[in-house]
Image: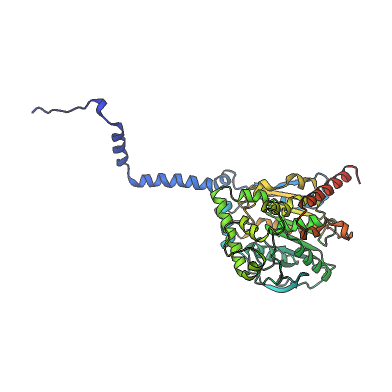
Amino acid sequence: MNQSISLQEPSSINPYSFLLDAFTLIPLWHYLVIFLFIFSVFLYHYLDFHFFQDVFAGFKGCPVTLTYNSNSHIYHNVVSKCRVLHSRYLATPWLASPHLQNFFLTFLGNPPDVTYQRELFRLADGGTIALDWGVNSMPRDDASPILMVLPGLTSDPNSSYIRHLTYNTFRLGWNVVVSNHRGLGGVPITSDFIYNCGWTNDVREVTNHLHHRHPNAPLFIVGTSIGANILVKYLGEDGENVPVSGAAAICCPWDFLIGDRFIRRTLLQRLYDKALTLGLQWYSEQHRHSYSRLSDWEGKMHSIRHYHKICDVGKFETVDAFYRRNSSAIYVCNVSVPLLCINALDDPLCTAEAIPWDECRENVNVVLATTTHGSHLAYFECITASGIWWVRAVDEFFSVLNCSEFKHKQKDLGAESTLDSTLDHDHSSPNLMVALVKLVALVKAGFRKWGF
């Protein structure tokens, strides 16, 4: 029986049809595996995971980079004795992403149990803020050191990182007090002023209050995030004339103008902007009557920049002018208190682009510690994420400083000792303030150069 085989000319064969037929022969779950692999690679890079980098490095962690002046007595006599700052930071392996760390800090955080005893403090302008003392931290003797904590944007004493700091510090026998911002901690706004990211009068009044009440107790301050910006600005404004023995600024934003550009740069950064705006929206809703009376707020906020535009600009011409005037980077050169600054280079909120490296290096009282990883205030370590690295670093720094002769002692030089902090009430001269800060820094540099 003859069989006829029909052969098509090669030119009449469509190669794409053969390719499509071949693809249909591949099981569907193979495509799903390929898709999941590509998506995982995308997420790994987009969310800045570093787990495999940690694996290949043998889980040794990243080194701590210290920036300081070569003539700094604070570094040579205090920081050089701090083992934590000369070790390495290894993030919790299952939190090997700054965004995961930030999420975990916000919603979980593994905070220890801490209770507080509240003291209401009345400010000179009629405002009220809550001073929350950790239980067993109410000053029992005038010689016990006091640690004052300035929280972040809308944080309060129950925020997980503040509870970690409070718990670990009063285990050392120190007294710990959290100075809430106006309108936070369940305290109403009782004056015609809403706190902002550069307002230093409140911390100035509280530190003076604590010093006058406990004159023999060394006073140390930790500022976190926005609280760090307020702290550095306050120390720079008042120079030698502060009753503060030592300070630490954790994850300081440094330059709001750069930070504003950064947080609107990518989709992920805009999500952070929206999340922070929701926090400010909540804060505004809690004090709707005050906001409606003191600002142009109409009930909605679209971004952090929009919030500052309607609530904080005041006598400034633009939001950018407000940011320039209230950024702490221009004040760090005039800090006269031993100051430890800690920043993570992968901080998703406070970009490393804003860190004033040269200004920190110029000031003999400042030591800047930077790490490759750490996120924003998170710095979780150990396999169970039970500890926060910067808390250990700060506690050790303050402990060594407190036992040394390099604690700052207030020199009451009168009104001339400050950089005219009354300019806080007159926002029409931001360039004058910048010029004054730079002039003081140049004079100090000249004195050091000629050995005075």
Along the horizontal axis of the image, is 42 left or right of 303? Answer: left
Residue at position x 62%, y 48% in the image: 262
Is residue 56 at all visible to an observer of this figure?
Answer: yes
Choose between 85 and 436: the one closer to the eye.
Answer: 436
Is residue 109 at all visible to an observer of this figure?
Answer: no
Residue at position x 64%, y 61% in the image: 161
Q: Position of residue 430 (x, y in %)?
A: 76, 52
Question: In the rendered image, which quarter is residue 361 located in?
Answer: top right
Choose between 65 and 129: the one closer to the eye.
Answer: 129
Choose between 81 and 69: the one closer to the eye.
Answer: 69
Residue at position x 60%, y 58% in the image: 276
| 298, above or below 16, in the image | below
Q: Position of residue 102 (x, y in %)?
A: 59, 56
Q: Position of residue 407 (x, y in %)?
A: 83, 58
Task: Tell me how the rendering is colored.
Answer: rainbow
Q: Position of residue 270 (x, y in %)?
A: 56, 52
Q: Quadrant of the N terminus?
A: top left
State how many labels appear: 0
